[in-house]
Image: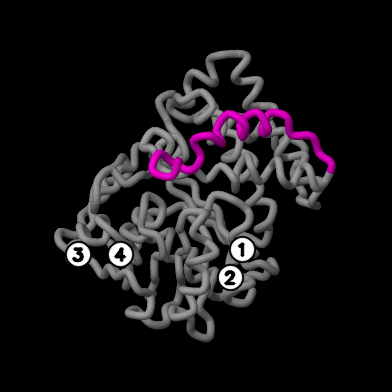
Amino acid sequence: MKIAVFGSGGVGGTFGARLAQQGHEIHFIARGAHLAAMRASGLRVEGVRGDLHLHPVRAVEDPAEIGPVDFVLFCVKLWDTEAAAPRCRALLGPDTAVLTLQNGVDGPDILSRALGPAHVMAGAAGIFATIAAPGLIRQPAPVQNIMFGELDGRISARGRAFEAAMTAAGIDGRFTGETQTELWKKFVYLSALSGMTCYTRGPVGPIRDDARLFAMLRAAIAEAIAVGRAKGVRFDDGVLDERLGVAGRLAPEMKTSMLYDLESGNRLELPWLSGAVVRMGRALGVPTPTHEAIVAALEPVAKGKSRV
C-alpha cells in the first residue's frame, strides 16, 4: 500500500515505521529539525516492541510532492487540524481514506468538512511514544494498537485491507462498525488521564496510589462518560470500571503525551481534551466539575512557554 503519514511524531512516526518495515511505501510529512534529521540519517524507533532504523526515508514537508495515496494516517496535533486538513487534498485519489488518529473527538468532523465524509475514517490509537530527539522516537510501553472504522459504520474493502496490513506489521489493528463508541471510550479515558497527570505534574503511579487523586481520576472519567451519553454515545454499563482498569495496568512511571508537552514547555491539547469535556458539558447541561478544575489549573500554561 502507498501510505502518507501526516504528522510524523510519536504516533505517526512509530506506526509508519512499522508499516514501512513490512514493505509498504510510506511517505512521512514532517517539518523543522525532525524532517531534516530524517532526510539526513533516517528515522529510528527505539522501544520494547523492537528497535528499527529506516534509511533512507521518504520524508517531505509539502504533501503535493507525494501525490495520491491509498491511506493517510492523520496524526497532527489537535491545534493544527484546521490548517492541515485542506492540505490532504493533494493526497486524495478516488478511494483514498484519511484516517484520523488524534486524541480528541473533533477531528473526523473537521476532516469531513474539508475533504468530504467519504474520504474520512475515524480511529483511536493506543500507543505511548514521543520524539526523543530529531529523527528518534522512543516507545517505552508495549501497547501498540489502532481501532478504526468508516464514519457510517460500513465494513469496507479498504478497511479490511488496512487491518490486514497492520496485523502483518505487528500493530494490533481492529476494524469496527462501532466507531463512535470506540472513539469515545478512548476520549473519556485519555481526557481524564492527560488532565490528571498534568494537574499533578507527575506520572500515573502516584495518582493510583493516592485515594484522593484516584477519586478525582474516577470522577473525571465518569463526567466524560456522562457527556458522551448526553450526546447519544452508547456505552456498556461497565465502561467506567473497564476504563479505570486500563489505567490500573499501566506502568507506574508512565506519562501521557500531554505531560511530556507540559514538561517541555510546549503547547497543550487541553482545549480539545478536558476543555472539550467542559464545553460540551455546558452545552448539554451536564456538570463537569473535575474537568473544570483541571482546565482552571492548566490554562495559564496551555499555550506553552514560548507563547505565554
- Mark 3 vs mark 4: which is more N-terminal? 4
Find the magenta span and give its range. 285-308
Looking at the picture, does residue 60 appear above or below residue 103?
A: below
**Quadrant in the picture for residue 285:** top right
Mark 3 or mark 2: whose residue is earlier in sequence: 3
Relative height, residue 230 to residue 243 (above, below): below
Check disc 2 and give the amino acid type: Val
Expressed as whole percent of the image width and height from the top left, the position of residue 122 reads 59, 62
Frontmost of labels 4 and 1 is 1
The quadrant in which the N terminus is found is bottom left
Which badge, 2 or 4, is on the more N-terminal residue? 4
Query: Which residue position holds label 4?
Result: 20
Q: Are marks 2 and 1 in contact (CB under 8 Å)?
A: yes
Residue that mark 3 sits on: 39
Q: Earlier in the sequence, mark 2 or mark 1?
A: 1
Q: Which mark is residue 108?
A: 1
Quadrant showing the C terminus: top left
Inter-mark Cα distance, 4 to 1: 25 Å
* Residue at 70% over, 27% down: 219
Q: Can residue 47 be found in the magenta stretch?
A: no
Q: Secondary structure at mark 2?
A: strand
Residue at 38% x, 54% y is 170
User: Whole-percent x and y of residue 158?
Assistant: 53, 74
Residue type of the residue flagged with mark 1:
Pro
Q: Which mark is residue 120?
A: 2
